[in-house]
Amino acid sequence: MTPQQPRTELDSRYSSALNPRPGAENVTATDWAEAQSRLRAAEVFWITTVRPDGRLRVTPLMAAWHDGTLYFSTGPGEQKAKNLAGNAHCALTTGHGSLAGGLDIVVEGTAEQVTDPARQGEAIAAFETQYGDHITSSEGAFFGFGDSIREGGDLLFAVAPVTAYGFGHDGRVFSHTRYTF
């Protein structure tokens, strides 16, 4: 599957481009390749799902970026799975967590359960690459992760971005990039 390339645009309303600070005149949209690099390197993501009564639920999890898609897993009885069964729209967020510098990414889309063994295998390999010993070592906190998905103990979901946002900042100037797929 060839990942889509998004339309990328700087939203100057939320960027330093109109700010008189030195350096602000050089603010540009963050390239999608850089955003993808951040998604591949991140260890902690936050997922936002919608409860049946409309309230939002936000929780941390691991996710892996592979072939233009974010993958995550959850137990079938967990609140995330229950929420997604009723409303598959969600957002996954990751970032630097500091105003001193970094790039924060938000990916919005619809979660699709992955049951095809070949696609599961590709996603599990992406998790193993991204998280290494956390998943692959018998001493790792998430050892057995792949087996749990293959055996049905955990559900695997894929979120292809519909819209994504990149929030870049270096402590002085900031940028707001919108990626539309």
Image (tube, grey):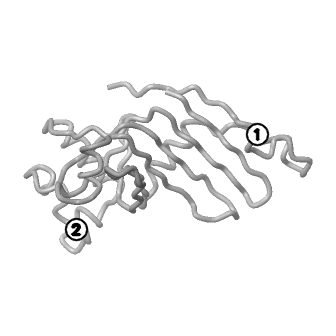
Quarter of the figure with the N terminus = top left
- Rendered residue at 45%/56% (across/down): 42
Q: In which quarter of the image is residue 8?
A: top right
- Rendered residue at 70%/35% (across/down): 10
| Front-most of residues 57 and 10 | 57
Q: For the residue marked with disc 1, what is the amino acid?
A: Arg
For residue 39, side relative to residue 154 (left or right): right
Counting from the top left corner in percent of width and height, residue 20 is at: 92, 47
| Cα gap from disc 1 to disc 2, whole angstroms | 46 Å
Q: For the residue marked with disc 2, what is the amino acid?
A: Ser
For mark 2, give the secondary structure: loop
For mark 1, give the secondary structure: helix
Residue designated by label 2: 137
The label on residue 70 is none
Work out which residue is located at the far left of the displayed protein and give it: 151
Q: In which quarter of the image is residue 170?
A: bottom right
Circle 1 packing at 10 Å, graded few (<14), some (14-19), many (20+), is: few
Work out which residue is located at the far front of the displayed protein and give it: 53
Counting from the top left corner in percent of width and height, residue 54 is at: 39, 50
Of the residues tagged 1 and 2, which is closer to the observer?
A: 1
Counting from the top left corner in percent of width and height, residue 167 is at: 63, 48
Residue designated by label 1: 13
- Rendered residue at 32%/52% (across/down): 129
Counting from the top left corner in percent of width and height, residue 16 is at: 80, 46
| Front-most of residues 79 and 47 | 79
Q: Quadrant of residue 25?
A: top right
Work out which residue is located at the far bottom of the displayed protein and give it: 139
Circle 2 packing at 10 Å, graded few (<14), some (14-19), many (20+), is: few
